[in-house]
Amino acid sequence: MPQPKKQTGLPPLDWLRVFEAAGRHGNFTAAADELGATQAAISQRIRNLESWLGRQLFSRGARGVTLTVDGESYLPLVQDTLRTLEQGTADLFGKSPGEIRLAALSSHLDTLVLPRLTPFLEAHPGLRFVTDSVPLRSAFAEEPAALQLRYGRGDWAGRKAHLLHTEVLQPMMPVGLDAVAWQSAPAIELRGERPGWQDWARAACMEAPEPGGLSVDSMGHALRAARLGQGVVLGSKVLARSMLATGQLALVDAPELTCTDGYWLTWPDSFTASRRRRRLVEDLIEALGQP
């Protein structure tokens, strides 16, 4: 184990970059591939850093290397410091980000993002806006995109969140259905975290329509089914905005139900440390939050 040495200041930046890569990968070979160095060079820099600190950062074994307790404690500090240095350098001397990436459910990209995106793109000419369609809510945890549009309560660990739209539900019917007889039409069941027909009925003090034979797990599918005349839906007013505006669906003259959940733009805590990125996020929030 390295013997403690009295040192002042900071260890060389190159050693810290090597330690961060090796700690992130948990492998000296992968760190060498990423940094374009040999495994021997990576090992030497790690030994130099350990000697400088007087602490062992990795345990070496026949099956590879693992971070020690000291290494696990030091890694996030080094990562945050390098990230802050990179972002600060970009703020002072770099160009504006050339690309921004947003992950969301496909139906949310269709209804909440693309219809509101034009002002943002016009305000940032030359910026490449990339969308990633996420098939399931649970897949967000594995999604590499920093910016994500999520449905929920805004309480995701390690992420900041800004509420774009509160979810408001109201009965909707196909165009042409008698407004008085809508409760006689079959009710489309939507499975998931949103309140259902019985929740709406209790809040509205009204009878819910009888269940039909269709059950879906996506609000987008429920709205489309109602538009096709397959029943009435307790629909999201924000997701159905264009369908209502173009006469593809009609609101029932009945009470609406405001939910505790909503649609949030979220990002990692460190993403907006850069002034330029922070400005992009603020402009995107303004665009996507439009009615």
Image (tube, rainbow, N blue to C red):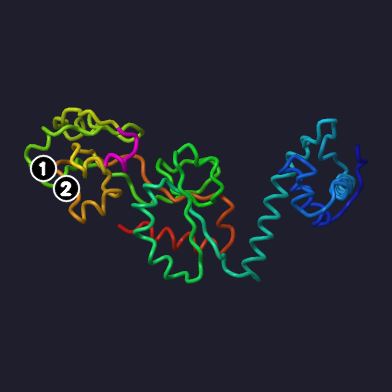
Tell which of 188 and 76 is nearer to you.
188
The disc placed on residue 177 is 1
Between the C-alphas of marks 2 and 1, the distance is 9 Å
The number of callouts visible is 2
Determine the main secondary structure of the stretch shown in magenta. Answer: helix
Of tags 2 and 1, the one toward the viewer is: 1
- Farthest-out residue, front: 228
Residue 39 appears left or right of 140? right
Q: Which residue corresponds to mark 2?
A: 250
Tell which of 159 and 143 is nearer to you.
143
The picture places residue 51, in percent across and down from the top left corner, at 90, 45
Amino acid at circle 2: Ala
Amino acid at circle 1: Leu
Dot 2: what SS?
strand
Residue 221 belongs to the span the image colors magenta: yes
First in residue order: circle 2 vs circle 1: 1
Say above or below: 123 vs 53: below
Residue 189 appears left or right of 262? left
* Range covered by the magenta-colored residues: 216-223
Q: Residue at x 55, y 41 (%)?
A: 142
The picture places residue 30, in percent across and down from the top left corner, at 76, 45
Dot 1: what SS?
loop
Residue 215 belongs to the span the image colors magenta: no
- Residues tagged 2 and 1 counted as in contact (Cβ below 8 A): yes
